[in-house]
Image (cartoon, rainbow, N blue to C red):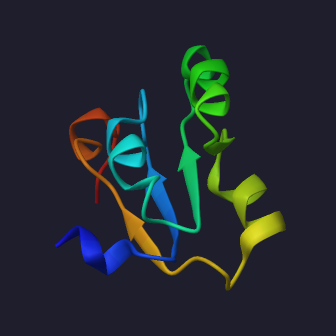
Amino acid sequence: MLIFFRDKIVLDYGCGGGAFLDLVSGLSEKTLGIEPFSGYHESLIGRDHEVFSNIESAQLKYKNQVDSIVSFGVLEHVENPQ
């Protein structure tokens, strides 16, 4: 399953502390995280993930370049998921 991320630009929307990004970082060309909580940013950057606070800032740099987008455990944190 992880082979799917080989040599790809992977974005984790709502990446939290970056566990999934850590998992695929050795396979992927680049790992990107969108995480609104700035408390995780320094750690993510220190592990060579590129991090953004919101989708708009990520799109400014990576629009139409991301190969895979994942999101785990996010819906329960969204005020109005519909």
Can you give x and y, in whole percent of width and height, for residue 61 in the image?
A: 82, 66
Can you give x and y, in whole percent of width and height, for residue 76 in the image?
A: 21, 37
Residue 1 placement, left or right of 23: left
Query: Quadrant location of residue 42?
Result: top right
Q: Check the picture and name the quadrant holding the N terminus.
A: bottom left
Residue at horizontal 33 percent and vertical 36 percent from the top: 19
Q: Check the picture and name the quadrant holding the C terminus.
A: bottom left
Query: Quadrant location of residue 78?
Result: top left
Can you give x and y, in whole percent of width and height, for residue 27 in the image?
A: 42, 64
Q: How many marks?
A: 0
Say above or below: 11 vs 52: below
Can you give x and y, in whole percent of width and height, for residue 7 in the image?
A: 51, 77
42 or 58, which lies in front? Answer: 42
Residue 4 placement, left or right of 42: left
25 or 55, which lies in front? Answer: 25
Say above or below: 82 vs 45: below
Say above or below: 76 vs 42: below
